[in-house]
Image (cartoon, grey):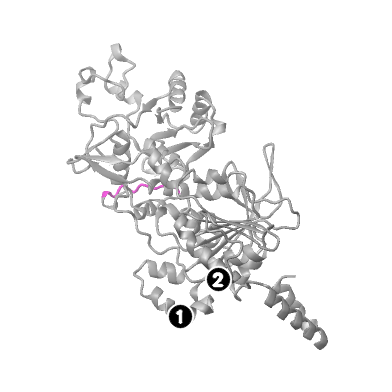
Amino acid sequence: MTPAELRELMPYLTAEERAEFESLLAQDMRERVWVPLPGPQTLAYESTADVIGYGGAAGGGKTDLAIGKALTQHSVVQIFRREGTELNGIVDRMAEVIGHTSGLSRQHPAIWRKPSTRTQVIEFGSVPNLGDEVKYQGRAKDLLVLDEASNFMETQARFLMGWVRTTNPDQRCQTLMCFNPPTSAEGRWIVAYFAPWLDKKHPKPAMPGELRYVAVIDGKDVWVDGPEPIKHGVETITPQSRTFIPARIADNPFLMGTNYMTTLQAMPEPLRSQMLYGDFDAGMEDSEFQVIPTEWVDAAMARWRDLSPKPVMDAMGVDVARGGKDSTVIARRHGQWYDKLVKKPGKETPDGPTCAGVALAHLRDNAVIHVDVIGVGSSAFDSLTTLGQDAVGVNVAEKSTARDKSGRMSFFNLRSQLVWQFREALDPAANTGIALSDDPELKADLCAFTWKLKGSAIYVCSREEVIDKIGRSPDNASAVFLASMDTPKAADIKRKYARPSRGDYNPLRAADDSVRPVAQRDYDPLDYRHGR
């Protein structure tokens, strides 16, 4: 029985039964190596959720909860920190709790086996680099602990959770994520993961400890009403339960008697609000080399409203995935208003014609279609042009001839140009009124790009560098960058510059400037900035 169930029975016990119960309880307390603190720690300890989020503020007993659950509720446990050197404190604290180091190896990673039976195993691990999580593939455990979970990449966390399982029908399987508010944009995935508790804009907020259910459909979290299995195509998907329990230093009497509260109170903002109160809305520091400030993205998403009827569609951006774990993403721009992104798993766009068909299904007003032709995108572009569509193939690795808004700096390549010019458009001083749908993945993508100078040229980090940072391809942002381009429609060009001998003229593919219409020689079709 759980402590909560025992407390409910206490009023119904006779004096003799109460005395016997207290004697048994005293004996149990002597035998148990750890008991949770009353309040949030007990609530998390007793939770039946498949995934438990715990913490928020500093000093709430996150590490002790992880050790306590591992020692008293589970048999095969893995406890992770992002960096291996950060595990030393957890290992030392565990030795304190059990009162000895017997059964605890000091190898890296450390492993503890219960001396009496050796059937209980606690392994400590780390995954500092993307891909390190693969080393733990197939390693079953009934408790996975991610300490300081917001420091992990989301893909790493989900991969490690894939082997939370047991063959023992009496053993509960759980994941425990302990964390403070993230201090960088890369850690914001944790807010979306526990959105009913942490996202103030969530339409159905949840109470601490309340169970909510999530079905993962086509790789995306979908919040559902209950644990009942869901039919999706030929699959039957069983939702998992999640919960979050906030905790602060005020919930930990052991730390309240120290000067730790004073230390937290003396921290500069926003760390003070994050660590003292667990404030997930406290400002996060953007890197000084982050291309697009988080605040500008938030402002653009706050402006978005679902419009009906929609304005004329000016352009479409298509970032193509063919199979694999990435998605084909389609962005649709109507003036300065961007519709919700269309996302299709790579397995649903296995070839160029299929991808072209998906794009055409969402095309309106003969909008120009910009397709990333690096790699698999070339087939989709060929299919669109074969169908007579106004499609433009974009190779973001190509040289750029444009300059930034000041006219002083050039761009290392077309990718750098598109990302930087989107920054200029989002700049509040530009007053463009760009509206982006409130999409957590899009926000993470847009905020992941960094820059540096190479000579006098602006270099924006590559897709591969972004993948190393957020653990997935920034397909959402790539589609938006493509849609932001302001290429004139082919019909407009033909009307204005009738050239019977070059009816197939494409301004993006003209290698010789001498063949361009004179009036177009100064025109840069890749400069999307409206009003120029």
State left or right for residue 337 relative to residue 400. right
Q: Secondary structure under badge 2? A: helix
Return the residue nearer the eye: 461 or 511.
Answer: 461
Numbered label tally: 2
Q: Residue furthest bottom?
A: 15
Q: Is residue 431 magenta?
A: yes
Left or right of residue 455: residue 478:
right
User: Which of these two is toward me, 106 or 391?
Assistant: 106
Residue plotted at (72% across, 57% down): 171
Q: Nearer the viewer, residue 57 or 349?
A: 57
Quarter of the rendering containing residue 486: top left
Task: Please provide percent x and percent y for residue 238.
Answer: 68, 48
**In the rendered view, would you say 206 is above or below 415?**
below
Q: Position of residue 252 (x, y in %)?
A: 53, 76
Q: Residue 398, can we see it?
A: yes
Residue 203 visible in the current orientation = no
Please give the residue where the numbered disc 2 appears in the rendered image. Answer: 96
**What secondary structure is found at the residue carrying circle 1?**
loop
Helix, strand or loop: magenta stretch: loop
Of the two numbered discs 2 and 1 in the rendering, the one whose residue sits closer to the viewer: 2
- Which amino acid does the dot numbered 1 rest on? Thr
Q: Is residue 339 left or right of residue 69?
A: left
Residue that protrudes farthest toward the top in the picture: 501
Indicate the position of residue 78 as horizontal and vertical percent values.
59, 55
Q: Is residue 291 magenta?
A: no
431 relative to 105, above or below = above
The residue tagged 1 is: 258
Q: Quadrant of the N terminus?
A: bottom right
Residue flagged by tag 2: what amino acid is it? Answer: Glu
Q: Which residues make up the magenta segment?
A: 430-437
* Above/below status of 304 relative to 517: below
How packed mark 2 is, by other alpha carbons closer than 10 Å (few <14, some 14-19, many 20 or more), is: few
